[in-house]
Amino acid sequence: MTNREEAIRSFSRLLEIMDELRAKCPWDKEQTLESLRTLTIEETYELADAILDEDLDGIREELGDLMLHLVFYSKIGEEKGSFTIREVLDGINHKLVYRHPHIFGDIEVRDAREVESNWEKIKLSENQEKTVLGGIPSSLPAMIKAYRIQDKARGVGFDWEHRDQVWDKVSEEIAELKAEVALSDQERIEAEFGDVLFSLINAARLFGINPENALERTNLKFIHRFNYLEQQTIRKGRSLKDMSLEEMDRYWNEAKETES
């Protein structure tokens, strides 16, 4: 039996288990599309954590959890007479073939960027009522949403000619923020601060950096250093509140050395 045949058999087994759970398990029988939503979000973040930790075993496990959720939604859809797992799979199969004419058709592309650009144009052609930014979920976290907004705009050609030009925009937004801070108008300060963040996210995108991942790595780095600082303080029978900034900095620098 080939790996693909084994995979198909394993997927078929998951469908059978889902049928059994939905028919016999009190908890599974109670679940709805709405009740699963928050659990799916949680599972997605657990997968994201495993990816950042480069935990391959964790990634495998979390992918299994997400696969269960996808099958669960499809089972509920089937019960409602709305869609089946076959229709879900047929839909994505058709979409992938249609949106990759450079693979399944006679279109030629130069690079990955042109593939993305064609993808966005094809999406718009499928539904004339769609807008470029219309498909971005409103509930996305603000940083991820900003990145997707900029990426989709780039897909239709709305972008800097040269990525280094973005630094002028970052400097401009920081100057405007400083000017509003000097005037002490809190509402305008917040607006300008948002512009600064948006421009920095744009810079991250242009230089191939995922800002969400970058910030999370910095969060983890700060947590590690601060925990070290706190542990060293407790070990000496002291409180952080009683320490000077100079003493804190010394332990902070020690924590940095342990990272290297």
Image: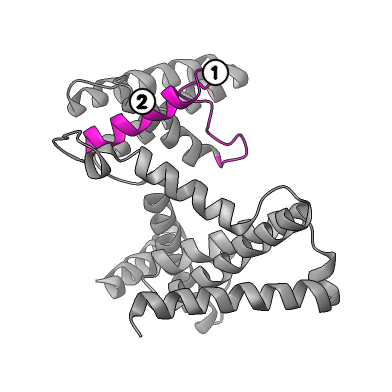
Which element carries disc 1, helix, strand or loop?
Answer: loop
Percent position of residue 187, x then y: 61, 19
The residue singled out by tag 2 in the image is 121
Circle 1 residues within 10 Å: few <14, some 14–19, many ≥20: few
The image quarter in which residue 242 lies: bottom right
Q: Dot 1 corresponds to which residue?
A: 129
Q: In this view, does 214 lie to the left or right of 46?
A: left
Looking at the image, which residue is at 76% across and 50% down?
81
**Residue 168, picture quadrant:** top left
Instruction: Quadrant for the C terminus, please.
Output: bottom left
Q: Residue furthest left?
A: 110
Q: Please tell me whether residue 114 belongs to the stretch shown in magenta.
A: yes
The residue depicted at 48 percent of the width and 39 percent of the height is 143
Q: Where is residue 8 in the image (x, y as percent from the top left)?
A: 46, 74
- The answer to whether residue 240 is above or below residue 130 is below
| Among the 4 quarters of the image, the one containing residue 142 | top right
Q: Is residue 127 above or below residue 218?
A: above
| Mark 2 crowdedness (10 Å alpha carbons): few <14, some 14-19, many ≥20 | some
Residue positioned 64% across, 55% down in the render: 84
Q: Give the range drawn in magenta.
A: 113-141
Q: Name the amino acid type tagged 1.
A: Glu
